[in-house]
Amino acid sequence: MIEVDAVSQLQSGLAGFNWDQCNQCGKCSSGCPAARYLDLRPRRIVAMTQRDLVAEILESDVVWMCAQCLQCVERCPSDVTPYDIIISLQNRAVRDGFFYPEGLTKMLASVKRLGAIQPPMEIVDREFEIYDRESLDLPEIRRPKELEKFVEALEKVMEGS
């Protein structure tokens, strides 16, 4: 088993990270749309973090199931923010070489290539009329002004430097 010091590794880079304030009320898990699919619900993830069982969390794929809806943040009466813990665990998993979804690599490649996860799409209505952003009077998608510099900065972040 890999030794991971939860306090120093999870708090690094997260200001106001007060996971130790959790009283296990369960409100975060009761509002979580992904909870029925999780082996470990948000409340349990926080409890395991409190007990320095981070390695066990990282060895599972549970942190990748988060819908990132922020319900846990909204519902928590103690401002524990299980979402921040989960995002921090995702970052740690990637940095430490733990499992991460194949789609994450594909998404990152798309961001490097396009400056976005996917290009703007055309839609078709019931009458088979085709619409794009311009025809719907939607603003143009904002992309990095200098894609090469953006990609370079992104790669530095992914390397952890």
Image: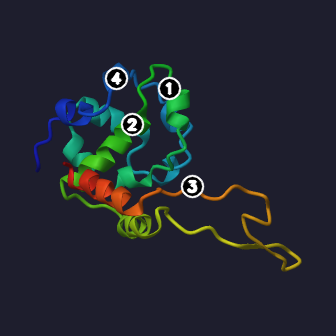
The dot on residue 18 is 4
Instruction: Kindly report the distance in space between the C-alpha atoms of the residues bearing marks 1 and 4.
Output: 12 Å
SS for tag 2?
helix
Q: Which residue type does callout 2 highlight?
A: Asp
Circles 3 and 1 in contact, beta carbons < 8 Å: no
Q: Where is mark 3, residue-wise?
A: 142
In the image, which is nearer the foreground, mark 3 or mark 4?
3
Q: Where is mark 2, residue-wise?
A: 84
Q: Earlier in the sequence, mark 3 or mark 4?
A: 4
In the image, which is nearer the foreground, mark 1 or mark 4?
4
- Please rate how many residues cluster around mark 3, counting C-alpha atoms within 10 Å: few if below 14, some from 14 to 19, many from 20: few
Residue 9 placement (x, y as % from top left) = 20, 36
* Residue at left offset 42%, top offset 70%: 113
- Please rate how many residues cluster around mark 4, counting C-alpha atoms within 10 Å: few if below 14, some from 14 to 19, many from 20: some
**Residue 147: which quarter of the image?**
bottom left
Instruction: Kindly report the distance in space between the C-alpha atoms of the residues bearing marks 3 and 4.
Output: 34 Å
Q: Which residue type does callout 1 highlight?
A: Cys
Q: Earlier in the sequence, mark 3 or mark 1?
A: 1
**Is residue 2 positioned above or below 74 on the image?**
below
Pick whichever, 11 or 111, lies toward us. 111
Circles 1 and 4 in contact, beta carbons < 8 Å: no
**Is 92 placed left or right of 19 in the picture?**
left
Residue 160 placement (x, y as % from top left) = 21, 49
SS for tag 3?
loop
* Residue at left offset 84%, top offset 77%: 129
Q: Which residue type does callout 4 highlight?
A: Asn
Q: Where is mark 1, residue-wise?
A: 76
